Image (spheres, rainbow, N blue to C red):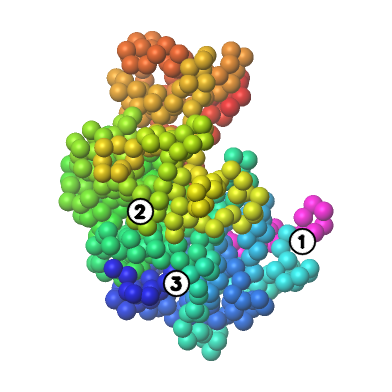
Amino acid sequence: MAPAGELALHERFLRGVDLAPRNEAVRVGTRSITYEQAHERALVWAGALLRAVRKPPGTVAVLAEKGIDAYVGILAGLYAGAAVVPLQPGFPPARTRRMLRSAGVSAVVADAAGWAQLPELTAPGPDGERWLDPDGPGAPLPVLAPGCPPGALPGLERIVPAAAEALVAPRPVRAADTAYVLFTSGSTGRPKGVPISHGSAAHYFRLQDERYDFTPDDVFSQTFDLNFDCALFDLFCAWGAGATALWVPPGAYRELPAFVAEHRMTVWFSTPSAIPLVRRLGGLGPGALSRLRWSFFAGEALTCRDARDWRTAAPNGELENLYGPTELTITIAAHRWAGARSERIAVNGVVPIGRINGGHEHLLLGADGRPSADEGELCVTGPQMTRGYLDAADDAGRFLTYGDRTWYRTGDRVRRIDDGGGLAYLGRLDSQVQIAGWRVELSEVDHALRGCEGVTEAVTVDVVGAAGTELVVFYTGREVSAATFARQLHRILPTGMTPRHYWHVEAFPLNSNRKTDRGALRARAAERLGARP
């Protein structure tokens, strides 16, 4: 259990320093840094940031690839009492500009990749106006860029850390202060900034400490990019236990059992899309991942088949399906896989999302906008809920006032199941499509397809053509004729719900968060059909 009074997010790292000062806090390839080394470096960097920022604590962006500098940069921002904004150097510059401006960034920690992108980010916009003005028009942007070649860049003020300016201890914060800001895309694709407070994070990680038995001997996978909220589960659960966070390079999936064994990994966390990939590469044999004590999956629907196969490969640990939007602080519900029992209560072959975290209330909103007893849109209120987006205009439609409380509308349809208050995930509200008068739930079609001969995984998307909305299926496994699909599906689905187009792929495209990229599949289907998504 978290020590009484532990509030600031960075205090979890300080707990790791006390528990295992010489343990590796982070390992990335051949590079690593211990808890005491990272602590000392973060204090130096935090002091440099505070000296450079004229309006402390401010907001510190970490524009860096996954490496030691990125992890220490996150710590340094927290130690300085700033809100930390993890960013991806690989994102389009225009998108990163919008995020920097929206968050009101006052300083940046950058590695070589981030440093190379900064001149374009700080150049004048099309109207001649600077994109970034941290302290008034014309003021340079302070940048701490360790390991980057010296040299001045227009519009940038280089921060040089000095040991003499190191903080003695991290700056104190209040529960309401923002710990970090993550960006999620809305329906328009415009990034929406989500501030998460120290108080929300403290509640969340206190629950994780009560639920799990992590120790300094654990080694956590780091599969997520640092701008994806699930990465914070890995980091701060590991750091709160004095354990090691280990970067998982893309090539590791080719020989995942060997990678897990070599690095003595005990905790795995990824999107479910990793499971078909590891299966296809032969890594899910019985006992192949026997070192794992805990396996977690989140970010998209986890099928019972995938959970069953992973559990066979990792028989000595527990598997949990975690659920939660960024606006509710990482994850807000969990279901522990229980074999046949989990399959019995599953809906459409998808593992339940389980019970809502303690200290929260939830309601299901029916299609008529009124609370429903059994099924509807999941709405949640409680200590993990964000106070609202950075841009208040984005709040419209996402928050609900009911009774005397404000609730976050997840946009996800769920159903109550006979599981002591548990919930089953049915899909996004916008995954329902109308086909010739039929209201079709795409997740139900996916489930039916997974039962077809020769199919390993399937994703159904909708496109609009001359004949109206049509369903297109992409699937992995062995190639199957459209006639065979039609014959099998007609036994399960009404004619109006049966897709017309079936395309075999070797693997599904993944987005930057390693989820199946349904948007890319829709675009591919529209191009082939001469239609529009």
- Residue 110 lies in the magenta stretch: yes
| Discs 1/2, front | 2
Residue at x 30% of width, y 37% of height: 417
Amino acid at circle 3:
Ala
Residue at which label 2 appears: 357
Q: For the residues carrying marks 2 and 3, which lies nearer the camera in this image? A: 2
Around disc 3, counting alpha carbons within 10 Å, would you say few (fewer than 14), some (14 to 19), or many (20 or more)?
many
Label 2: state its secondary structure: loop
Asked whether the residues under the numbered discs 1 and 2 touch, taking CB atoms below 8 Å apart as contact, a structural biologist would say: no
Q: Is residue 225 visible?
A: no
Q: Nearer the viewer, residue 459 or 263?
A: 459
Residue pushed farthest right?
127
**Residue, x 45% and y 13% (percent of image)?**
496
Q: Which mark is residue 88?
A: none
Which sits earlier in the primary sequence, circle 1 or circle 2? 1
Which residue is identified by label 1?
A: 130
Q: Give the amino acid at mark 2.
A: Asn
- The reply, left or right, for residue 320 in relation to residue 510 is left
Which is closer to the viewer, label 3 or label 1?
3
Q: Which residue occupies 32% across, 79% down?
A: 18
Q: Position of residue 395 (x, y in %)?
A: 60, 49
Q: Is residue 372 magenta?
A: no
Picture quarter containing residue 203? bottom left
Other residues around mark 1 within 10 Å, as few (<14) / some (14–19) / many (≥20): some
x, y percent for residue 317: 20, 52
For residue 8, the mark is: 3
Residue 459 position, x and y percent, is 42, 29
Among the two numbered marks 3 and 1 on one chain, the one whose residue lies closer to the N terminus: 3
Residue 85 seen: yes
Q: Nearer the viewer, residue 211 or 283?
A: 211
Q: Quadrant of residue 469?
A: top right
Q: Is residue 378 left or right of residue 18?
A: right
